[in-house]
Image (cartoon, rainbow, N blue to C red):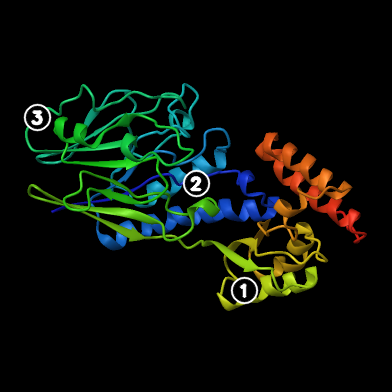
Amino acid sequence: MYRILHFSDLHLDASFARCGMTPSVARQRREELRTGLKNILRKATELGVNAITIGGDLYEHDHASNDTMNFLRGQFETIAPLPILITPGNHDPLLPGSPYRLTNWPANVFIFSATELAPWPLDKGLTLWGAAHNSPSFRTNLFERFRASGDGMHLALLHASDVTCVPSGKVAHCPFSPDQITQAGISFALLGHYHRASLFPEKEPLYGYPGSPEPLGFDEDGAHHVLLVDIDGNRVTPRLIPINTVDYRTIEVDASEALSIEDIKQSVTSKIANEHLGKSLVKVLLKGTLNPDVTIDLQSIVDDCHEACRFIEVENHTIPPYDLDTLKDERTVRGAFVRKMIGYLEGCSAGEKRIAEQALIFGLRALDNRGIELP
């Protein structure tokens, strides 16, 4: 039996800017990605694998440091002579000045460099075919005109997109359809690019995405994995193994009963404690119909609740404390104001909408002679 441990999309040196993290938290997350690699290599040793494959986006080209590349070289050297086979992806493409080209890799590391599928012999009667992204915008369907040559079983290692299940907001790199894998003479494809783990189809899978081994944002909550692949004769048995140590969680807090912002803060900290999220990175969604006397100050909630967990982000999804459908029919200054603001909201961009909604509530509070506390 031949055994492979496959992972992808680690994204070493990610900035974490999209999560709005402080520089100190972002630095800690980058260190945890390094720890994630150490955990993967340790798992490979525990499982007694014959090779490790990496399906791209090992690091981020725009942020990669010499220190990170030296870290990778040192870690890969510790498990020599175990082969490590890498296919560069769209975030770590094999550009002319790529760190892949500039790093003095140990002898057990092989990086696919061609933009067409090329062979690497894993074992007698077992061949791995891989190719590299040579730019961030590489889009070629590598299976379309390819046919594996030679006797024995053939596997593929690619950073590529199954076009039948492209996630929202994800660009299709090296797009393919599942039937093209079989037509190419490939028994199983080890893939990267999608950050959610999947095996397709569930019975006798043709391919596997391990997903990112550590989550990179709140859209990647839940378990994260590496992929263990056993090849025994003509049979391929893939299995997803949980690996992540970092936890992103999104929770909802009902603000309907709150009489002040302090009540909301108490609800947030209690929810985090009750769900044992003290070591997690937490996004809080405030829900419910807000009391008209309560003014939401998101930064104040973050400032007062940040010690309850590792990192906290708060979004206001409460329902405005006014019946706008009723108010817009009033033949009053208040009704005219509501009609004007509703018309504006219908035409404004997504980025302007939250500010406009807040302006509507502030205006109604002012017309009702209620206090206004600007954030």
Query: Between disc 3 and disc 1, whose residue precedes?
Result: 3
Find out whether the residues at labels 3 and 1 contact each other: C-beta distance under 8 Å. Answer: no
Image position of 290 with respect to 27: above or below: below
Counting residues from the N terminus, which is met first, the one under dot 1 or under dot 2? 2
Q: What is the spatial separation of the Cα atoms under label 3 and label 2, in whole angstroms? A: 37 Å
Residue type at tag 3: Gly
For marks 1 and 2, give the one nearer the viewer.
1
Where residue 184 sits in the image (x, y, percent)?
17, 30
The residue where tag 1 is placed is 271
Q: Which mark is residue 71?
A: 2
Asked if residue 17 is positioned above or below residue 266 in the image, the reply reads: above
Of the pair 362 and 225, the residue shown nearer to us: 362
Seen from the viewer's position, the closer of residues 297 and 102 is 297
Q: Quadrant of residue 53?
A: top left
Screen quadrant of the N terminus: bottom left
Label disc, if present, on residue 150 of the rendered structure? 3
Residue 8: x and y in percent read: 39, 45
Q: Looking at the image, which residue sits at the far front?
A: 331
Q: CA distance from mark 1 to mark 2?
A: 39 Å
**Residue 353 horizontal side relative to residue 283, left or right:** right
Horizontally, residue 95 falls left or right of residue 289, namely: left
Please tell me whether mark 3 sits on a helix, a strand or a loop: loop
The picture places residue 363, in percent across and down from the top left corner, at: 86, 50
**Could you tell me the amino acid type at mark 2?**
Phe
